[in-house]
Image (cartoon, rainbow, N blue to C red):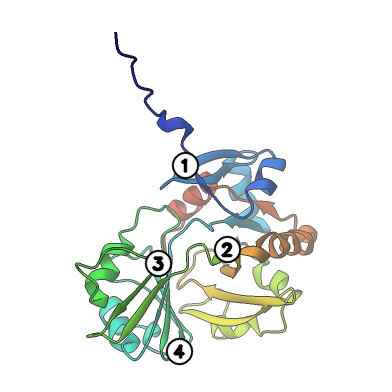
């Protein structure tokens, strides 16, 4: 009788991990899976983590989210197509995509656009960009070029770690770690009515700060190099101790965003 071949157990398949996976494990997190990524779901309980975000500070590791950098002369036309007549049509502006408001377009420079996927992982970013950037029909890849649109599209998901800092003391913490005027990202108002972004330094290393538009709770998305993630994360936690900063799992983040839609 022929031997029955071994069938792979999907539960044992390797998951992609964020650069903070070891830190999360050390701090007793319960992991979950999103789009083949191992993600931190809950540290203590989502209610206390959400309370920390509302009253002090909380920070979530969203490094698993899709991130795409677009460069070239066609960025202006693409941004208009993706966001309409929005603040993202000018450098430094941030706006949600018309097709999916959970996705943010961040205009870093006149010819450079950073697109940040949803923290739920449920966006259709690949499809949206393929249609808008003229890549429809091209196979997915880390880098794609559209000659007709004069656009270079680069998948930078694993180039940048990404954190989402929440709480009324968000800017106070950041002022301890950067010389950049974080108030400039809110037009002098806290919270900002319009989103904005900037490339700067944080804790002595390069970083991108992204203020989401119309937040119900003051917050900032922070992107830094994948290899610098734990260093920046630890600096944020250490500096935020005075405000009782707490790690925020994805369950708590979903709860926070559902209670405070943007």
Looking at the image, tell me whether mark 4 or mark 2 is earlier in sequence order.
4
Judged left or right of residue 262, residue 53 is right
Which label lies toward us, 3 or 4? 3
Disc 4 is placed on an element classified as loop
Q: Quadrant of residue 9?
A: top left
Q: Marks 3 and 1: in contact by CB < 8 Å? A: no
Give the residue at mark 3.
142
Q: Position of residue 14 (x, y in %)?
A: 49, 40
Classed neighbour count for the residue bearing mark 3: other residues with Cα under 10 Å, few (<14), some (14–19), many (≥20): few
Give the residue at mark 1.
33
Looking at the image, tell me whether mark 4 or mark 1 is earlier in sequence order.
1
Tell me how far mark 3 sits from mark 2, CA to CA: 17 Å
Give the residue at mark 4.
91
Classed neighbour count for the residue bearing mark 2: other residues with Cα under 10 Å, few (<14), some (14–19), many (≥20): many
| Front position in the image: 242 or 1 | 1
Looking at the image, tell me whether mark 3 or mark 2 is earlier in sequence order.
3
Tell me how far mark 4 sits from mark 1, CA to CA: 35 Å
Classed neighbour count for the residue bearing mark 4: other residues with Cα under 10 Å, few (<14), some (14–19), many (≥20): some
171 is higher (above) or lower (below) than 30: below
Which label lies toward us, 4 or 2? 2
| Front position in the image: 106 or 12 | 12
What residue is rendered at 24% in x and 75% in y? Answer: 132
Tell me how far mark 3 sits from mark 4, CA to CA: 25 Å
Looking at the image, tell me whether mark 1 or mark 3 is earlier in sequence order.
1
Q: Position of residue 182 (x, y in %)?
A: 63, 80
Give the residue at mark 2.
161
């Amino acid at each position: 009788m022929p031997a029955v071949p071994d069938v792979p157990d999907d539960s044992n398949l390797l998951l992609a991990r964020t650069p903070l996976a070891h830190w999360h494990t050390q701090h007793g997190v319960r992991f979950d899976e999103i789009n083949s990524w191992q993600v931190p779901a809950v540290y203590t309980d989502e209610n206390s983590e959400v309370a920390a975000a509302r009253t002090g500070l909380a920070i979530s590791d969203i490094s698993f989210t899709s991130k795409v950098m677009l460069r070239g002369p066609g960025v202006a036309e693409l941004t208009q197509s993706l966001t309409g007549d929005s603040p993202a049509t000018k450098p430094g502006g941030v706006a949600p995509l018309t097709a999916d408001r959970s996705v943010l377009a961040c205009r870093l420079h006149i010819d450079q656009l950073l697109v940040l996927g949803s923290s739920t992982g449920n966006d259709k970013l690949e499809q949206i960009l393929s249609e808008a950037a003229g890549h429809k029909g091209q196979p997915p890849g880390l880098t794609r070029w559209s000659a007709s649109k004069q656009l270079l599209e680069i998948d930078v998901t694993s180039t940048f770690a990404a954190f989402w800092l929440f709480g009324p003391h968000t800017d106070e913490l950041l002022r301890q770690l950067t010389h950049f005027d974080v108030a400039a990202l809110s037009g002098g108002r806290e919270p900002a009515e319009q989103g904005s972004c900037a490339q700067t330094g944080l804790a002595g290393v390069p970083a991108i700060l992204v203020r989401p538009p119309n937040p119900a709770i003051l917050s900032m998305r922070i992107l830094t190099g994948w290899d610098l993630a734990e260093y920046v994360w630890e600096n944020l936690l250490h500096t935020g101790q005075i405000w009782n900063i707490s790690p925020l799992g994805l369950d708590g983040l979903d709860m926070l965003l559902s209670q405070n839609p943007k």
